[in-house]
Amino acid sequence: MTSVSLFAGAYALADDAGSKAETPFTVEITGHQWWWSGRYLSNSESDRTFTTASEFHIPAGKEVRFQIRSADVMHGFWVPRVTESVDAVPGQVTETTIKVDEPGVYQGQCGVFCGAQHQNMKLSVVVDEPEDFEAWYDDQLKVPEPPEEGTEAAEGMKIFAATCSGCHAVRDTAAGGVYGPNLSHLMTRSTLGSGMLTNDSEGLARWIDNPQQIKPGCRMPDLGLDEQKIDKLVAYMETLD
Ligand code: CUA
């Protein structure tokens, strides 16, 4: 059985049986000051796991199990049209099941006061048609193609390894930091800094230049990079699609 048909298979089986759909995967959501990570875990194939941030896709009309955690203080996983605020408690796991029938983007916000940037701890649940969801899921599992030698993006990858990889991960590279968002498929997300900026070349350059100006107190420091280095980093980021 191919990995793609795993989902189709699981759904078809559940539909045929006319019973509640067997949950084919779990999303582990973790609240951090001040952003959200999400780890997708296939319930039957251990290699279909990946980590993303801030924007969490689910298939329309299917039940999905969410496990809510915290990396630091209390947060609330709150998406008003999808779920009431679910507490993210340090050292605990709070489980909830989410099912949304109507495709669309559902905006959310941290539901528990958690410090300086609580208001800016946004997230979204993106409800896709099941086939779009499967395509998204398969895409997130891919290894990003390394940039061609000699390009600005290749230079950026080297700067990233030296400067950013302690906090950020890119799938199947030496960058394995878990303190900040996983960037393997950064360009599939629409915002930066959990809703602070539009994720495009201008937004990337501004964020990398000085996150403290945009989200004061956030854990990413002003790295004091010059414009040339920022441009190279942006070029590399834009290959992570
Ligand atoms: Cu996290 Cu409020």
Image (cartoon, rainbow, N blue to C red):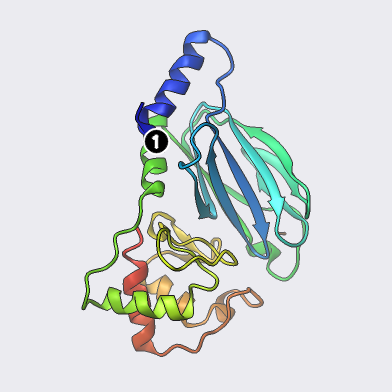
Cβ of mark 1 under 8 Å from ligand 1: the answer is no
- Looking at the image, which residue sits at the far top? 17
Tell me if mark 1 has few (under 14), some (14-19) or many (20+) residues whose alpha carbon lies within 10 angstroms of its own: many
Q: Residue at x 52, y 85 (%)?
A: 223
Left or right position of 145 against 167: left
Name the residue that disc number 1 marks. Answer: 134
The kind of residue tagged 1 is Glu
> Where residue 16 sits in the image (x, y, percent)?
47, 10
Q: Quadrant of ligand 1?
A: bottom right
Q: Residue at x 74, y 62 (%)?
A: 72
Left or right position of 95 against 36: right
Q: How many discs appear?
A: 1
Task: Identify whether 84 is placed above or below 63.
Answer: below
Q: Residue at x 64, y 60 (%)?
A: 121
> Where residue 162 sits in the image (x, y, percent)?
44, 80
Frontmost residue, 210 versus 65: 65
> Where residue 36 sits in the image (x, y, percent)?
61, 56
Task: Identify whether 217 is placed above or below 60.
Answer: below
Asked where in the image residue 2 lies, by quadrant, the reply is: top left
Frontmost residue, 172 versus 102: 172
Q: Considering the numbered disc 1 on the image, is that residue within a helix, a strand or a loop?
A: helix
> Where residue 23 sits in the image (x, y, percent)?
56, 27
Asked where in the image residue 81 lies, by quadrant, the reply is: top right
For the N terminus, which image quadrant? top left
Task: Identify whether 20 is placed above or below 132.
Answer: above
Q: Residue at x 65, y 53 (%)?
A: 30
Asked where in the image residue 96 lies, by quadrant, the reply is: top right
